[in-house]
Amino acid sequence: MDNPAKLSELLSYKERLEHTLRGTSSGTFTHDFEKGLLYFDEMAMSLLGIDKTHITLQEWAEVVHPDDRDKTTDKLFKAFNKQTERIDLDYRVKTSNPEVRHIQVNAVVKYKNKKPAKSHGIIIDITAQKENEIELYEKNQELEQFARIVSHDLLTPLNSVIGFADLLKEKFASLPQSREFQYTNKILESSTRMKTLITELLEYSHIDGIKKLERIECNEIVEEVVTDLDSIVKKTDCKIKYDSLPVIEGCRINISRLFENLISNSIKFRKQNSTPEIVIKGRESANFFEFSVEDNGTGIGEDDINEIFKVFKRAENSEKVAGYGIGLAACKKIVNDHGGDIWVISTQGKGSTFYFTIKK
């Protein structure tokens, strides 16, 4: 290079990049498709547990953990066929120790005549992150199991209390002003509220990820939910509109619960002396399915918008509405399990629109 200043700048940039990669347990690679070879730097070789600076694609596939090999190579070749420019892979490699290492690969691919010609990327060691995720998952499973057991053990005696209180209320029904009737009524109301809380907690603990992906017709799901909510829909004269919602893949039970929680939430927070109207829309984007549930209800104050998706958090205008702030937290958990996100745009007194995404 004729320009010494430019050369010095490039060397400085190269040194900074190498320091950064070493600090993040990352290596680099280049895939030359015409030669059929992948070239690695020292850190990448160490992460993959190989002792050669370049290997064939077949040799690379042998490095991938047997349990991840087919799905990883399948995803890779599908990306090539679609001429995807950016490819992200997440797989395990089994090194010689024999340590299992979790690897993340981020690459950019250049194509020539609709075929991959060359790619450059980084290889990152995410073993610690994955181990933390597994540990967190196991702890969450333990907590959810504990919640199920405790909730079940609490419900059994509570149902007895409600049953006996109901009998006492009937006995004192002819004396509505008596202390016996009023005390019994308070016991019944309090125990019924506690049962509602325990039931909601139990339902929340049952949302434990996606065990099996199913093809879901969202129009069918919403139709079933509206039918299940028929009593409150008719009582409030609620108008629910939806049409041509996408077909997605996910956990059918949880997606149904998601729509039910959002629709029933819109009905609960309706304006007085106003017919509730709910409009449900959905569309497909590059990586997600995007949905919205819009209502003309009471809306949510600005201070509450970032809080309502937390367990036991309720908006300020919810004092007169039954519930314990678990429904929207359950919605967030379901959406997150499906690789998506959920948020709301709302103006108090003018209604709310809940948006959520489901990953393809």
Image (spheres, helix red, strand yellow):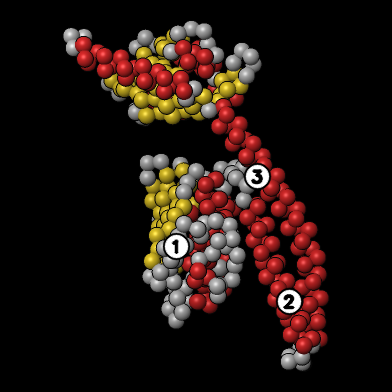
Measure the C-alpha gap from mark 2 to mark 1: 34 Å
Q: Which mark is residue 277?
A: none
Q: Earlier in the sequence, mark 1 or mark 3?
A: 3
Image point (37%, 45%), residue name:
285
Depicted 78 relative to depicted 95: above or below:
below
- Judging by the rendered image, the residue that carries numbered circle 1 is 303
Q: Amino acid at mark 3?
A: Asn
Query: Which secondary structure, mark 2?
Result: helix
The quadrant of the picture occupied by the N terminus is top left
Depicted 339 relative to depicted 198: above or below:
above
Measure the C-alpha gap from mark 3 to mark 2: 33 Å
> Residue 34 location, x and y as percent?
34, 12
The answer to which image quadrant residue 62 occupies is top right
- Tags 1 and 3 in contact by the CB under 8 Å rule? no
Q: Which mark is residue 140?
A: 3
- Judging by the rendered image, the residue that carries numbered circle 2 is 188
Q: Amino acid at mark 1?
A: Asp
Q: Amino acid at mark 2?
A: Leu
Q: Residue furthest top?
A: 52
> Residue 201 location, x and y as percent?
66, 58
> Residue 190 location, x and y as percent?
70, 73
> Label 2 neighbourhood size at 10 Å, few (<14), some (14-19), many (20+)?
many
Image point (57%, 29%), residue name:
128
Image point (46%, 23%), residue name:
23
Q: Is residue 139 left or right of residue 130?
A: right
